Image (tube, rainbow, N blue to C red):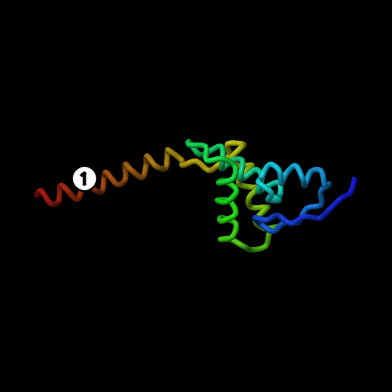
Amino acid sequence: MEIESVKCECCGLREDCTQDYIASVRASFYGQWLCGLCCEAVRDEASRKKAHPGVEEAVRAHMAFCRMFRSNPAVRVADGMRQMLRRRSGDMPKPDSSKKYSAVQSMHTKFSGAVSDIAV
């Protein structure tokens, strides 16, 4: 079992993997080597589309996205993992309905006062 260092064709992150694993990832993603995080992002993208565009289109879309934000791969991986874990755990920030309701009440009060000033 020989270990090889490969670079993700999307984000540029390097990983040490066995040749068998590298071959299986490339087979799954049309000959492209993708790191674990990019693999998950592509699978997520492919499953979100209602028309199921397929893995090949999802790979192209993800590669284009990564090209737009080329920076330190470690920072991107950490940020991507944080977002993925939040999304999967349901811990994404949700709007506080009590704050929203009080803001609407405040706006209504101000608006009502302005309307009554105009009517007088």
User: Which image quarter is the N terminus in?
Assistant: top right
Taking the view exactly as shown, the residue that stands out farthest to the right is: 1
As rendered, which of 31 and 63 lies closer to the eye?
A: 31
Q: Is residue 46 above or below residue 6?
A: above
As rendered, which of 10 and 19 lies closer to the eye?
A: 19
Circle 1: element type: helix
As rendered, which of 57 and 87 lies closer to the eye?
A: 57
Q: Which x, y percent locates residue 43?
A: 61, 41
Q: Which x, y percent locates residue 87?
A: 58, 40
Q: Which x, y percent locates residue 71?
A: 64, 63
Residue at image coords 66%, 45%: 29
46 horizontally vs 120: left or right: right
Residue at image coords 48%, 37%: 51
Label 1: few (<14), some (14–19) or many (≥20) C-alpha neighbours in 10 Å: few
Residue at image coords 31%, 45%: 106
Residue at image coords 67%, 62%: 72
Number of dots carrying numbers: 1
As rendered, which of 101 and 72 lies closer to the eye?
A: 72
49 horizontally vs 21: left or right: left
Residue type of the residue flagged with mark 1: Ser
Q: Which x, y percent locates residue 59?
A: 60, 48
Residue behind mark 1 = 112
Taking the view exactly as shown, the residue that stands out farthest to the left is: 120
110 horizontally vs 90: left or right: left
